[in-house]
Image (tube, rainbow, N blue to C red):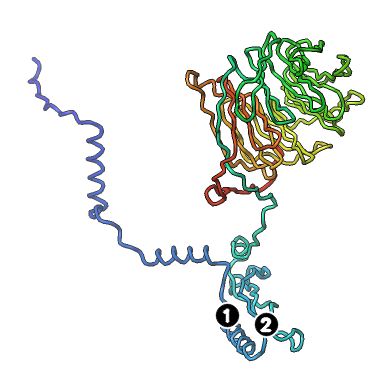
Amino acid sequence: MPGPTMEMEPVEPQSLKKLSFKSLKRALDLFSPLHGHLAPPDPESKRIRLSHKVDVAYGGIKSASSGQAQNQAKSRAQDASEPTSSLSNALALPGPEKNNDEQKGGASSALVVGPTLQPKGGIADGQPSRSNAIMSAPSLSSDRNLTTAAIMERIPSRWPRPDWHAPWKNYRVISGHLGWVRSIAFDPSNMWFCTGSADRTIKIWDVGSGKLKLTLTGHIEQVRGLAVSPRHTYMFSAGDDKQVKCWDLEQNKVIRSYHGHLSGVYCLALHPTIDVLLTGGRDSVCRVWDIRSKMQIHALSGHDNTVCSVFTRPTNPQVVTGSHDSTIKFWDLRNGKTMTTLTHHKKSVRALAKHPKENCFASASADNIKKFNLPQGEFMHNMLSQQKTIINAMAVNEEGVMATGGDNGSLWFWDWKSGHNFQQSQTIVQPGSLDSEAGIYAISYDVTGSRLVTCEADKTIKMWKEDEHATPETHPVNFKPPKDIRRF
């Protein structure tokens, strides 16, 4: 028969957290009965910690020895009796390194610059003496002295200081176009300006009042480029319909058309001294036209993508183009060949701006804004901030204020000399437009450089001017010079 069965006592289940706390309490009760109290302070460790802090902060500046202090006191007393006195502050410099035995046996020596006597009759009466003597002083490790800032000479920054510029404010909004406003050009008389839009029209506005004066139609696609001749009564326009037109402003009609582009025309520029028109487009070619005969003089080919920006100058290089292939090319207009290719940018070069007085220009891309010298194209420096958007347009006036407009509606103002960004503005879309339509496509100063006009994606034209109430006290320059000049 089977034996009597033994009854097992039930074991209450316990959680892992409860068992862990029980084990921890038993360990604390066993090894540290006073675990709830703080450890008593250790005076020796506190003294070592304070001594280490003092050595780190003031290790490079040590007082002279007692004998040298007496010598200095004697020299000061002698200087007081002389008509001229030499005043200088003691400065500890690291002395020559010694071997390990000398470093273990005693403190190494440092060089202290102290006051000395001047030879009698060497300096005229009444002139202070500035000479120094070299004396030895006790020091600790020479490596630590080399790293202290007490003996380091502060090198001034080589970066130019920015000029103060008043902030700009929006004082007028002009509506009238039915599509994105893509281009702008000012009349040389500064009486009116014209704008081209995605609604396929060209409108002429009065500068003073902002009222519409005239509307010209003729393009069958959006108008991407405009230019007004300073020597003729002609206005030139280019658009996505592959057409380049010459308008007679006395008759308000097209008198010439220039055919040759294989795709949309994105930019155009007039030569300042000869009757030559330059246009660049999506066919990767910058074409040179004779204004009167409508003949194509050169086809400046060499870019691998759309030519979206161009400007001209009277001396070589007479033509400078920027492209979506991230390069900038200088062209010899006489031979129609490339002179120089700049490959500093990493993304599309959508805007170029030449300074009206200085012999240099700036190029804008999504990665950075760079400044180059002319005529060789030497890289000067980057602008000190990044707008972090696609920059569609850029302009600079004679006072050195450069304005850049971004695809997100940001309008930044820069000091041309130093590259300092002194104002960041955000355009406000007109009522009824989407926030995504806050984009700037074209920028231009008037002839005087006192007014700025922006063409935007919300179908408006905004006019800006400097704040006449701003002063250097109300809007100070917050400038921090960079440590070095970066190539990229």
Which residue position is annotated with label 2?
A: 116
The quarter in which the C terminus is drawn is top right
Type of amino acid at the residue the image marks with label 1: Ser
12 relative position to 143: left or right = left
**Residue to which mark 1 is pinned:** 65
x, y percent for residue 370: 70, 36
Where's residue 214, x and y in %? 66, 17
Q: In which quarter of the image is residue 389?
A: top right
Which of 27/80 is in front? 80
Q: Which residue is depicted at the point 48% across and 63% down? A: 53
Q: Decide which of 216, 42 is in the foreground and name it.
A: 216
Query: Residue at left 78%, top 31%?
Result: 342
Task: Determine whether 434 is above or below 25 in the image.
Answer: above
Residue that appears at 67% across and 53% down: 157
Against 82, is 173 above or below?
above
Of mark 2 and mark 1, the one earlier in the sequence is 1
In what element is the residue under mark 2? loop
Marks 2/1 in contact by CB < 8 Å: the verdict is: no
Q: Which amino acid does label 2 sit on?
A: Thr
